[in-house]
Image (cartoon, rainbow, N blue to C red):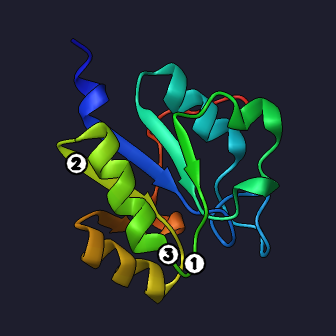
Amino acid sequence: MNPLKNIVLIFDVDGTLEVGDPPGPIPLSVLSYLKEKGFIVGIVGSWAKIPKEILSKLDFYYPGHPEKPKWLSEVCKKFNPIIAFYIADEERDREACREARVTYIRPEDFRLRVSIET
């Protein structure tokens, strides 16, 4: 059994990923890399901004505000992880995480300890 399947990484788009409006600090290559390593990876946010070739590799994608708590909860219900992280940039994202019992991480605090090709 892959222990990483007990960890869900959920990304916001605007202010978090490089394709967001505003652009965020996290390149899309990070999502692909994490998927390749066995994590459950997806989007709760403006997923229409994600290129189809990346989106098709993700485990899930749901819309964002105003129903982020609902979608974060849905992800947890679907995958039943030991821990779920939501990487997002706004205080209302932090509140959505509290409501859904998901750990909140600001994009600038989300770092990989390896270098990946972009």
Please rate how many residues cluster around mark 2, counting C-alpha atoms within 10 Å: few if below 14, some from 14 to 19, many from 20: few
Q: CA distance from mark 3 to mark 1?
A: 5 Å
| N-terminal label among 3 and 2 | 3
- Judge from the rendering whether residue 45 lies leftward or rightward of residue 72; answer left or right: right
User: Where is the C terminus found, in terms of image quarters?
Assistant: top right
Q: Badge 3 is on which residue?
A: 67
- Give the SS element for disc 2: strand
Q: Residue 103: percent from the left, percent from the top?
A: 28, 63
- Give the SS element for disc 1: loop
Q: Badge 1 is on which residue?
A: 65
Q: Is residue 118 visible?
A: no
User: Where is the N terminus found, in terms of image quarters?
Assistant: top left
- Give the SS element for disc 3: loop
Q: Look at the picture and state if 36 lies above or below 100.
A: above
Q: Amino acid at mark 2?
A: Ile
Q: Amino acid at mark 1?
A: His
Please rate how many residues cluster around mark 3, counting C-alpha atoms within 10 Å: few if below 14, some from 14 to 19, many from 20: few
Q: Is residue 103 visible?
A: yes
Query: Badges 3 and 1: C-beta atoms under 8 Å apart?
Result: yes
Q: Badge 2 is on which residue?
A: 83
Name the quadrant containing residue 8: top left
Q: Amino acid at mark 3?
A: Glu
Q: Residue 95: percent from the left, percent from the top?
A: 35, 84
Please rate how many residues cluster around mark 1, counting C-alpha atoms within 10 Å: few if below 14, some from 14 to 19, many from 20: some
